[in-house]
Amino acid sequence: MLIKELNNKNFFEKFLLECKEKTFLQSWNWGEFNKTMGDKIWRFGIFENEKLLSVALIIKVQAKRGAFLFLPHGPVLKSQETEDKRRVLNMLMNKLRKIARKEGADFIRISPLWESNQENIEIFKKLGFRKAPIHMHPEITWELELSPSEENLLMGMRKTTRYLIRKALENKEIQIIKTRDIKDVETFNKLYQDTVERQHFIPFSLDYLKNEFSAFNPDNQILIFLGKYKGEIVSSGIFIFWQNIAFYHHGATSLKHPKIPVSYLLQWEAIKEAKQKGYQFFNFWGIVSKEDKSHPWAGLTLFKMGFGGHKKEYVETQDLPLSKRYWLTFIFEKLRKIKRGL
């Protein structure tokens, strides 16, 4: 096996197109976005007999407590065989240990997009990984297959969700607008900040949202949906359309008109947009366990699941400690998780 740095966008994206388990967090444009945020990145390919087996986008995260190397939803492989995963991860870790020493990184963190099962968990354990104190990206997601007709998609929804969509369609004072104008990132952000104050989560900055939009917009891979009631924006979402999957990445709502189902219609319009583009799946991004009714995201989870689909659960975020300074990060993140009630 051989590991090489990859510099060709088409080659990188073509391989990902052939892989089943993937998200935009390993896309070329996500790497470009992180570069605009000032982060150092690497893109690697793992080859065997000149055949590409896996790709991985690695980001150096410079936190206040120290630096670490991060693989968001990677590495991505065509093969789902346990032995192939083990060999690829071992090769990658040998390379990243060297980079970590050079870059002064205290640990390596991976949010793998590998099914949560004992075999996959054991691969990480045998390489010295431990469960991270927090997750960086979704470990449980909700995904809807788009092959059924629109009517059948509606019939596959929760009864209440279907009713509210139809009720919204009948309301002439509800309007859903889709836009690729970067100015509307600020429109989204105004509603987003209201949502932050109400739900008490750590928000992404306006620069973050604008840079993400700018990274995906040239390839027509991002859309903002704005939901209006009586001319006022009361719901909004940022959706990424990458390869054969649409992702509901950011959302924001107002509580001014809680009985008007604007958010339901907005989500349905985004689903229809993905279907009309010929996409295979609509990914609602992160959810929590259905049983965890006290979790801050329990209501959002119920909302997403109401549109039909199925749960996908992945191996929890893994850390490979490389220095004693790692434990400062571990303690800090553990306390922050408890404080946020997650």
Image (tube, grey):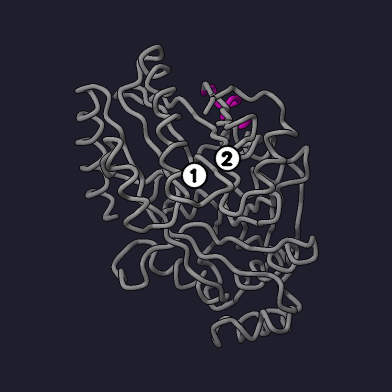
Judge left or right: residue 162 versus residue 279: left
Kindly indicate whether the residue at mark 2 contacts the one at mark 1 (C-beta within 8 angstroms). yes
Q: Amino acid at mark 2?
A: Gln
Q: Which mark is residue 73?
A: 1
Q: Residue at x 28, y 40 (%)?
A: 126
Quadrant into which the C terminus falls: bottom left
Judge left or right: residue 137 versus residue 209: left
Q: Earlier in the sequence, mark 1 or mark 2?
A: 2
Q: Secondary structure at mark 1?
A: loop
Percent across and percent down for residue 137 are 45, 47
Percent across and percent down for residue 185 are 66, 44
Q: Amino acid at mark 1?
A: His
Question: From the viewer's perspective, is residue 191 above or below residue 151?
Answer: above
Provide the residue designation for mark 2: 26
Q: Residues within 10 Å of mark 2 (few under 14, many from 20)?
A: many
Is residue 35 rendered magenta in the image? Answer: yes
Name the dominant secondary structure of the magenta segment: helix
Percent across and percent down for residue 311 are 47, 68
Judge left or right: residue 56 versus residue 267: left
- Range drawn in magenta: 32-39
Q: Is residue 262 or residue 250 the one in the foreground?
A: 250
